């Protein structure tokens, strides 16, 4: 079997940047699919996949990890970042081909399964609705009661945990990144701290004491402000405060200053970057994004986290194909705490794939079909192509 073509598709989501999909075709009629990277650099990723993938045309797709290492070495002068994401798009599609050729799910090629279902949490709860309720066809968040209703919707659906961002209900409602867009120095005055505390109070009261609540603040605060926020939120017993940083020392400072657990890692690419955070014990739960860094590195990061006695939480907020990739990942590693999933996402998300995850009582079934167990619907991808 030989690789005959490597292609990409950028698919519109109805809000924000596109989703990026990889396609590898072979002369045996087997096609591998992937979701990869971030749509904020869609044209750059397309070019990188073309540049990096050109050397694989005509080769046997089977030795996936060898291909990964060769791509990594060929891009050493541009290591990490978008190059790593482009490599992931190719490598993930190669794993799909390998599984399909063997007639097995990818996790069975790598020692799994460790489990037959995976606990998930509802991500961006109220966040997307605050930002674009009209596009999603849901009720706007005009009051704190509306926010509480979102929480009850999640718990009524069987979720035992959810994640949110700082939001501002009203007419219109907004997310924090909209409120402070272009005019924010990552400070947090007392009014903002009080606002976040009120939001967590509303959500905790609606959820009850046993539901896990995570607050994601991305890069929105400097270390000093994040410490004050984490300390103010201690009474609400958060599942974690999620905070992104490229250096481990600020996170270690935050973690040592509060009882609120810290989660980070989605922005890191490659086991070398994660190791610095593990060495400083700068986090309680580690985020790993399979579409951003690929299967090979994700597995190595999870294995290293196991040595450091840390559980992982896959970062997964886009299409069903990404969810199937992430579920396959959770099936082959032993140290999974919980996995992210979006409920409010693209209005046509279900159209884009040949299968959707089986979700019941806050758990997703691990897929057992060949490869990822889910393909990109190329006709739907063409229908919803991103052309900006």
Image (tube, rainbow, N blue to C red):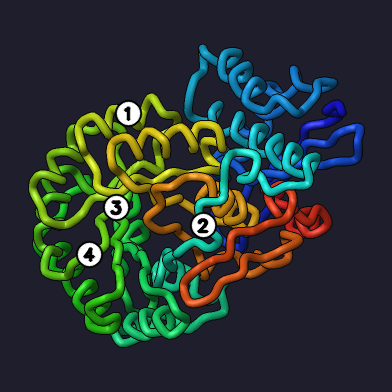
Q: Position of residue 127 (x, y in %)?
A: 40, 67
Q: CA distance from mark 2 to mark 3?
A: 26 Å
Q: Position of residue 28 (x, y in %)?
A: 91, 35
Q: Earlier in the sequence, mark 3 or mark 1?
A: 3
Q: What residue does disc 3 label?
A: 242
| Dot 3 and dot 4 residues touching (CB under 8 Å) | no
Q: What residue does disc 4 label?
A: 238
Q: CA distance from mark 3 to mark 1?
A: 18 Å
Position of residue 374 relative to residue 204, above or below, is above
Q: What residue does disc 2 label?
A: 115
Q: Position of residue 26 (x, y in %)?
A: 86, 33
User: In this view of the protein, can residue 235 be seen by the observer?
Assistant: yes
Q: What residue does disc 1 label?
A: 275
| Dot 1 and dot 2 residues touching (CB under 8 Å) | no
Q: CA distance from mark 3 to mark 4?
A: 10 Å
Q: Residues within 10 Å of mark 2 (few under 14, many from 20)?
A: few
The local secondary structure at tag 4 comes to loop
Q: Earlier in the sequence, mark 1 or mark 2?
A: 2
Position of residue 253 relative to residue 240, above or below, is above
Q: Earlier in the sequence, mark 4 or mark 2?
A: 2
Q: Tell me what residue is drawn at x 45 percent, y 57 percent.
A: 339
Quadrant containing the N terminus in the rendered view: top right
Q: Earlier in the sequence, mark 4 or mark 1?
A: 4
The local secondary structure at tag 1 comes to helix
Q: Quadrant of residue 130?
A: bottom left
């Amino acid at each position: 079997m030989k690789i005959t073509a490597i292609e990409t598709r950028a698919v519109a989501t109805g809000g924000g940047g596109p989703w990026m999909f990889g396609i590898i075709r072979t002369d045996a009629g087997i096609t591998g699919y992937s979701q990869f990277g971030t749509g904020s650099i869609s044209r750059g990723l397309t070019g990188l996949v073309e540049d990096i993938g050109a050397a694989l045309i005509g080769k046997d797709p089977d030795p996936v990890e060898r291909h990964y290492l060769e791509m990594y070495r060929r891009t050493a002068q541009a290591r990490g970042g978008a190059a790593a994401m482009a490599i992931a798009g190719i490598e993930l599609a190669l794993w799909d081909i390998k599984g399909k050729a063997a007639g097995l799910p990818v996790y069975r090629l790598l020692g799994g399964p460790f489990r037959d279902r995976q606990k998930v949490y509802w991500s961006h709860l109220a966040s997307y609705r605050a930002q674009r309720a009209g596009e999603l066809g849901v009720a706007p968040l005009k009051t704190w009661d509306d926010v509480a209703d979102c929480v009850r919707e999640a718990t009524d659906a069987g979720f035992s945990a959810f994640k949110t961002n700082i939001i501002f209900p009203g007419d219109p409602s907004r997310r924090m990144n909209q409120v402070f867009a272009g005019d924010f120095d990552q400070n947090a005055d007392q009014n903002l701290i009080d606002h976040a505390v009120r939001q967590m109070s509303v959500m905790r009261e609606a959820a009850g004491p046993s539901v896990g609540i995570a607050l994601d603040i991305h890069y929105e605060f400097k270390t000093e402000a994040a410490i004050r926020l984490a300390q103010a939120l201690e009474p609400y017993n958060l599942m974690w405060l999620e905070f992104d940083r490229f250096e481990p020392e600020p996170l270690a400072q935050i973690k040592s200053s509060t009882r609120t657990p810290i989660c980070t890692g989605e922005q890191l690419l490659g086991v070398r970057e994660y190791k610095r955070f593990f060495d400083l014990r700068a986090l309680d739960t580690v985020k790993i994004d399979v579409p951003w860094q690929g299967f090979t590195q994700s597995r190595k990061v999870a294995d290293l986290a196991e040595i450091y006695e840390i559980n992982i939480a896959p970062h997964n907020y886009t299409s069903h194909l990404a969810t199937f990739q992430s579920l396959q990942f959770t099936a082959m590693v032993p140290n999974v705490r919980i996995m992210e999933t979006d409920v409010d996402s693209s209005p046509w998300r279900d159209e884009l794939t040949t299968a959707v995850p089986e979700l019941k009582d806050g758990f997703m079934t691990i897929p057992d079909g060949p490869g990822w167990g889910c393909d990109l619907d190329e006709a739907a991808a063409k229908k919803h192509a991103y052309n900006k």
